[in-house]
Amino acid sequence: MKKIFLFAAAGLMMLSSCDLDINEDPNYPSSGEITSDLEFPAVINAIADATGDQMFNYGGFFAQYFDQMPEANQYNDLAELNIDESKDLFNRCYRVIYAGALQDIEDIKTKTTNTADLFACQVMRTLAFQLLVDNTSETPYSEALQTSISAPKYDDGKTVYEGVLAELDAAEAALNGEDIITMTDPLLQKNLNEWRGFANALRLRMYLRLIDGNVDASSYTSKAQALVSANNFFSDDVAWSVYSDQEGQFNPWYHGVFQLTNNHCAAYPIVSYMLSTNDPRISYAIKPRTSDGSYVGQFPGAKQSNAVYGSSYKNQDVSAIDYAPTHALPVFLFTQSELQFLIAEVQLRFNNNEAAAKTAFEAGVAADFASRGTDGVSEFLGNIASWDAQASAADKLKLIYMQKWAALFMRDHMEAWSEIRRTDVPALSSHSGLDISKNVALYNPGDLINPTTNQLGNGNIAMSIPYSSDSRKYNVNTPSTARKISDKVFWDVK
């Protein structure tokens, strides 16, 4: 998984020409021109490009890892939740996933009967639809990617989730025991057991969202328990490691902000939490502010509010995001750390096994420290993040969630945002940034903060993404009622 492959540049070139019709791309090479073994890396690259660039960026704002630098204005709309369909926030992700990844998978299906290859394709298809649903809840599914249907209907998120999970089960059941993965596979090196483990991790992630969405909770709880009991998961991070520290081969998020490197500063919640826990990971991608060398996060959506910062507020007054570690950063499709935290949750919530939950929790923290090359995990786990110091099972569960949020920073911001919506952790503070700036004792470190300038209205935070405006233009079956970012996805019922 750590080996570098140079598929990224070619993949990005291909993705840039995706058509707006998600059922067919006229720029797509004819079926006979590309073999399935070479097509599969483009599938992975397309999904990585969507989640590792646009979703990584807006997820970072919505998870309150990022805010807009005081002297820049590129992402004021994200910081202030000023998002509707006219902002075109989801267009590129929509095109890249449908006309890129999912169209490629459909083409591969016409070229091979190899059950191992088809299973790997289905794992990526499942991830793609999970991401689509977690953004917009409804999405084209049952009629999508059929050349005979130019305007596919939107299916509800529950239908899509359960549909792709059933497809995944069928694809795994179809494995004949003799087929091996023949496609070029820079992600998991043609290791079918790792692909099974990746599939199980996706199941676990989605089962927990179905459980908390009150969808057949008893059945999915049993399935989650069975997965954890079997413990057949991937062994390392599932990371798309095709990038390098060279112009034209950068990580997609870094490439997308390369000319805008003064845009992102650290948000107050992540800085305050890491400082409160003496977390050495704070230096991984957050710079001390230049005015005095301290770590200072910015209150979300407050840079344009003189009431909080005054008119002389400058970049030097806040901690910038350090872009240096991200030049060649992989796109993490599933981290070992997130997996272990999900296992810890199942052990604690459903199995009442605190010892096993502690083991998985500490493995999750350790995996994240290791992925960043950060020392001091033993000391960290022995102090503020001590499992045994938590007074109750509820406190232990909150610790799992909070440390997952910390571990997903600069790893997988889309999943961080989704997990915040599922768990309601970190919680939303009842106090405004202005009140906290006057009296920090009002604030519980790590809590989310209502943006000072909030276009949704006070007390509202981002819960989903508006439908693609391209879909609105070209698909008459796009839901007539526009989705607001305060609208919840189907599994968010709290």
Image: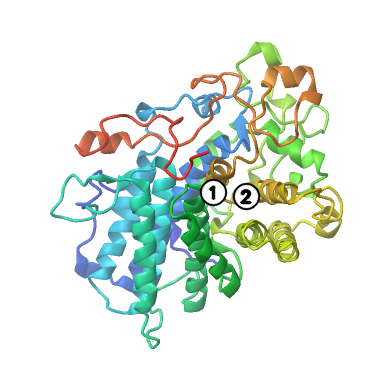
Q: CA distance from mark 1 to mark 2?
A: 8 Å
Label 1 neighbour load within 10 Å: few <14, some 14-19, many 20+: many
Residue shown at the point (69%, 22%) measured from the top left: 431
Q: Amino acid at mark 2?
A: Leu
Give whichever of 359, 34 is nearer the camera: 359
Q: Is residue 23 above or below residue 456?
A: below
Residue 79 horizontal/vertical position (percent): 55, 27
Residue 285 horizontal/vertical position (percent): 69, 44
- Seen in the image, is 46 located left or right of residue 471? right
Read off the residue under disc 1. Answer: 415
Residue shown at the point (22%, 70%) measured from the top left: 110
Outermost residue to the bottom: 178
Residue 490 horizontal/vertical position (percent): 42, 43
Q: Is residue 219 above or below residue 431?
A: below
- Seen in the image, is 127 located left or right of residue 276? left
> SS for tag 2?
helix
Query: How are the residues colored?
Result: rainbow
Residue shown at the point (71%, 37%) measured from the top left: 446
Whether tag 1 and tag 2 are in contact, CB under 8 A, the answer is yes
> SS for tag 1?
helix
Q: How many marks?
A: 2
Q: Earlier in the sequence, mark 1 or mark 2?
A: 2
Read off the residue under disc 2. Answer: 408
Residue shown at the point (53%, 51%) measured from the top left: 251
Label 2 neighbour load within 10 Å: few <14, some 14-19, many 20+: many
**Image quadrant in which you'd find residue 311:** top right
Q: Is residue 397 above or below residue 311?
A: below
Q: Amino acid at mark 1?
A: Glu
Residue 6 horizontal/vertical position (percent): 47, 64
